Amino acid sequence: MQENRSYLPSADRLGVLIASVLLTFALTKLIQSPRFTLTITLPGFYFAYPLTLSTVMTILAAALTATGMDWLTRGHPKLEKKSNIEHLMLPTLTTFVVGVPLTLLPDGTSWWVGFAFAAVVLVIVFLAEYITIDPSAPSYGFARAGLTALAYALFLILATSLRFSGVRMFLLIPILFMVAALISLRILHLDGTDHWDFPWAIGISIVCAQIGAGLHYWPLTPIQFGLALTGPLYALTMLSVSLAENLPLRRASIGPAIIIGLAWISAVFLR
């Protein structure tokens, strides 16, 4: 019984971490602050970005998650002296991504629904990352599948939220590039080895950023924009995994091509 319990984190530590992050999100609605506009003026260039308390608190919540996950994973008996950086990436990104739509949702029922959804997602990602520390854990396969699905869902949520907020392209492209790189890097690292596939992760993120730049001025709804970007991310990551398993290129390309086709066809008919 004691051995089985080692696959799950301390309930006290997990509760403190989740409560701290959710409290940070809640404070953004309880505390009102004036908006500050950051401006940079250069010859032929004008940059203006509104900074609010919500922006600062979302970044703070992500930093708090990274610190908390380090504290949580250090209690795993199988971690020992190994690096836990891979187990901090997705939880930190999750906190940032779920915090973005929370800042856009209006006060009322919709915000509380989003708040409850964020709480559930955080619990899932914290537990799953803790389980994946030990590849021999009975629930490792389930946790790996859950993290993979969650990573794609996060990218869809982020791309949709960025489109909804009307962020300018010179901010959109770097964000898409960094998030796509982190997500693909983490998914490819879930094979249970210590190999980091940086070339594939960078290549996938470049493709996603280029597609995002090309679609930025198209008359697409937020969900259409998100699907059009998530499809290539999913397909290219799948292609990388298939090629790593020494599948022939033609055979390995069938699944990714179907995924991109379905994603783009869905984007066309969703309005």
Image (cartoon, rainbow, N blue to C red):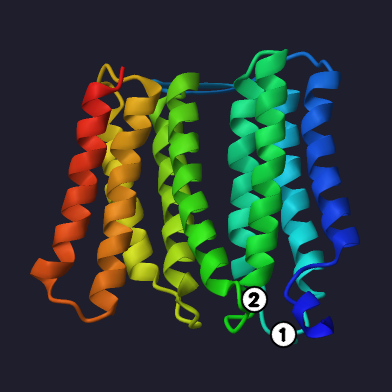
Q: Residue furthest front?
A: 1
Residue 219 at x, y percent in the picture: 27, 16
**Front one among 251 and 243:** 251
- Relative to 263, say whether 71 is above or below: below
Say which residue label 2 marks: 133
Residue 180 at x, y percent in the picture: 42, 51
Query: From where the camera sits, is residue 99 visible?
Result: yes
- Relative to 260, say whether 221 is above or below: above
Residue type beneath disc 2: Ile
**Front one among 184 and 216:** 184
Callout 2 crowding tier (Cα within 10 Å): few <14, some 14–19, many ≥20: many
Residue 179 at x, y percent in the picture: 47, 49
The reply to whether dot 2 and dot 1 touch (C-beta < 8 Å) is yes
What residue sits 73% from the left and 50% below the top? Answer: 63
Element type at mark 1? loop
Callout 1 crowding tier (Cα within 10 Å): few <14, some 14–19, many ≥20: some
Which comes before the other along the chain, label 2 or label 1?
1
Quadrant the N terminus occupies: bottom right
The quadrant where residue 247 appears: bottom left
What residue sits 59% from the left and 84% below the top? Answer: 136
Residue type beneath disc 1: Lys
Query: From where the camera sits, is residue 203 visible?
Result: no
Residue 256 at x, y percent in the picture: 21, 56
Say which residue label 1 marks: 78
The quadrant where residue 248 appears: bottom left
The span from disc 2 to disc 1 (Cα, nearest Å) is 7 Å
**Front one among 163 and 244:** 244
Element type at mark 2? loop
